[in-house]
Structure formats: C-alpha cells, structure tokens
Amino acid sequence: MQISVILPVYNEEKTINQVISSLLEKVDDLLEVIVVDDGSTDSTGVICKEAQANHSVVRYFFLPKNKGKTAALKEGIKLSIGDIVIVQDADLEYDPFEINAVVDPIQKNDLNLTDVETCYKAFRGNIIRNMVITSRRFGFEIEVVAKIAKLKCRVYEVPISYYGRSYEEGKKIGFVDGLMALIYIFKYNLFTSRKASFHKHFSNKNK
C-alpha cells in the first residue's frame, strides 16, 4: 500500500528541509509528499520548491492566505492519491521513521486508541478523502477521530517518540486552541451525524 504524506507548513524555514529529507530517506512505500504552504512569509516556499525540483515525489502547493493547519490539511488530503494518508508536522517533534510503524496496523486491522491529540494519524485514503472537514486551526485532530468513530473503523495506537519544542522555537498552539478543542469534542461527537460527516455512504466492509 503506497503512502501519501501531507505536510502542512507555515514559516518553517529552520526545519522544513530536514523534515522533507527525513521523509524521503526513512518512509517505506512513499508515493508522495504533499507540502501545503499556509501562506508562509519566510523562505519556506523557496526551500520547498527546490525540494520539488529535485525529487519527483515532492509536490508543493502555496495557499496565498494563512487559514490555519486544518485548511492546509484539507487541501492536501484532497490532492492525495495514496492508499494510506498520514500527516507529518513540519517541525522536528516527531521522527518520520516511525511512520512505518504507524501505518503497519492499517494492514493488520486492529483496534486501540487512548489519545486523540497526537501528531501521527494514518488513514485509508478512500475514507479520509471522503470526510467532510469543517473545523479550523488545530481542530483537525478532534474532528477526524470523532468522525472515524462514527464509522466504527478499526483503529490502532502505536507508541512513537516525541521531541517537544517551545513557543520560542516555533510552537504555535495556544489557549484558544485548547478552548476550541472542547467545543469541537461536543460538536463532532454529539451534534454531527454520520451522514453529515462524509461525502458518500460507507458500508462496514474494509474499514
């Protein structure tokens, strides 16, 4: 199964080159790295364009107006064609090598989940591309888990390493995002139907 990696970026000139290089080197069965630039004003775009010119699997897309992480992810997911879709953040908090372990359970069809606010989430391409995503900024994490749960999909959680960075180093999530997360938990779990969560109907087969 080939993998599409969605890489949302915003002013990540210090780390983006290393992240892309690491994805290319470490991820097995890599079909494409879709870089969605959410209106960066630094040299992120220049670095990404150079990577695209040098590597056929790298695809770079620029959004002229900054709309937040979820908007960038929606665009990347729409453009993806892989059997498996996974998100990679553009910092150095997570090691792309561990994507291989994260996607492995998709092929083994297991269930195990304890924490929704994690970086790596891998999906079957046909499911995530048909999801109706309406949240903003960092709401993606809450929304997709709530909507995947409505399908009763097999979900598996695997341990990965985490190398946290400070706000001074570029961390962008804040108090408002925490407040919005609570709102999204109620909205997508209690007030959003399965029918409204996807563009088309899914059967219980092959999920």
Image (spheres, rainbow, N blue to C red):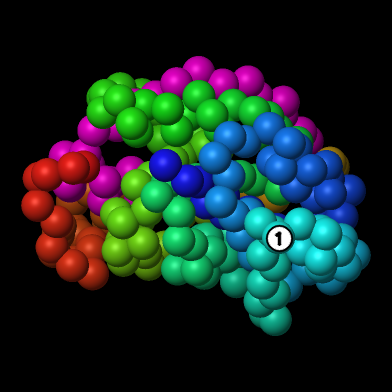
**Image height of 110 relative to 14, above or below:** above
List the single residue furthest toward the bottom. Answer: 64
**Image height of 149 relative to 183, above or below:** above
Q: Which residues are magenta?
A: 140-166
Which residue is the site of mark 1?
A: 56
User: Left or right: 97 with respect to 183?
Assistant: right
Q: Visible in this render: residue 128? A: yes
- At a point 23% along the width and 69% down the height, the residue shown is 199
Where disc 1 sits, the SS reads: loop
192 drawn magenta: no
Q: Picture coordinates of residue 74 (x, y %)?
A: 47, 65
- At a point 70% along the width and 67% down the height, the residue shown is 60
CA neighbours of label 1 inside 10 A, class few (<14), some (14 to 19), many (20+): few
**Image height of 52 relative to 101, above or below:** below
Q: Amino acid at mark 1?
A: Ser
Of residue 122 and residue 90, the one placed in the foreground of this image is 122
- At a point 63% along the width and 20% down the height, the residue shown is 161
Q: Picture coordinates of residue 3 (x, y %)?
A: 50, 46
